[in-house]
Image: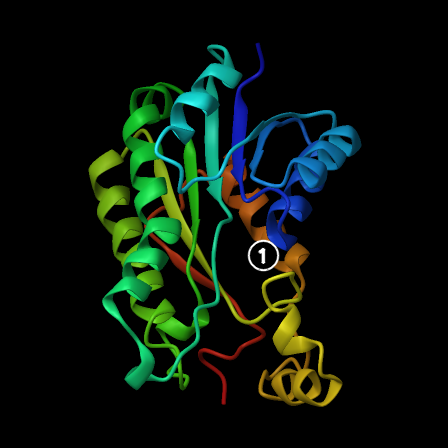
Amino acid sequence: MAKKILIFGATGSVGSSLAKLVKGSSMDAHLIGKNESEISKLKDQTGFNCSIVDVTDPNFIETIDKDLDGSEIAGIAYCVGSIDLKPINLVSKKDYLKSFELNLFPIVEIIKKFKDNLKKNKSSIVLFSTVAVKQGFPNHSIISPVKASLEGLTVSLAAELAPNVRVNCIAPSLSKSKMAGKILSNPKIAEGIAKQHPLKRVGEGSDSAALAKFLLSDESSWITGQIIGVDGGRSNVG
């Protein structure tokens, strides 16, 4: 039985791009998402099995475990995220909890559940942060600290799970996706955001997916505990 990469958020821009890249490699994958029609379509395109779950549901891990049917796990890509933008005067504790319940709490439970399997198979875990952790942007006081917690989790688990499991984090800038659709649907706004990047374009899901595939593969076997920007140079280049 082939070892599987668990791709969470498989129907998103990054997750679906990653699934298609994995299809063309020697790796196998298990797709995880909440939109039944979209994940079924991706399943047909890739031939990978899937689980239809919402990671904010209390019993989502039990469903995935049942669907895996004893499969060995070679890695996890948690391509789940949100864009929670509000001015600070409108931010509430509820906003933070909702964001943590999607972005952080599920992956902690996933790693706890499959830790022994991951260690046995010398697996790789890839998390996703945002350029907004390093670069300050207005109205990001919810998502920036929540995603920063994933960067902290990355380095903590890289230490705790070494040498058997590698843990890395990708920090993209704004990329074309369903989440970013409202922001990028205005051509002038999209053009303005593109110009804020030294490489003068907005990202694509495939940009982050290509790095994720590398980090999940044995080619990156000496890389762990890293926060890697896929951001068109926005975080470091003026």
Up/down of 94 relative to 30, above or below: below
Q: Position of residue 187 (x, y in %)?
A: 75, 84
Pinpoint residue 146: horizontal percent, then vertical percent: 31, 62
Q: In the shown orientation, is residue 203 left or right of residue 218?
A: right
122 and 100: which is toward the camera: 100
Res 164 quadrant in image: top left
Q: Is residue 141 left or right of residue 205?
A: left
**Which of 70/208 is in front?**
70
Q: In the rendering, at what x and y percent does residue 40 appear?
A: 71, 32
The residue drawn where x is 67% and y is 25% is 48
> Which residue occupies 64% across, 61% down?
178
Q: Which amino acid, by three-letter code, is at mark 1?
A: Ser
Residue at 36% across, 43% down: 167
Q: Is residue 151 above or below residue 37?
A: below
Circle 1 residue: 208
Residue 4, compared with residue 179, is above or below; it is above
| Image quarter in which the N terminus is found | top right
Q: Label 1, secondary structure: give it.
A: helix
* Residue located 25% across and 56% down the image: 152
Residue 214: percent from the left, percent from the top? 56, 44
Question: Where, by quadrant of the figure, is residue 207 drawn?
Answer: bottom right
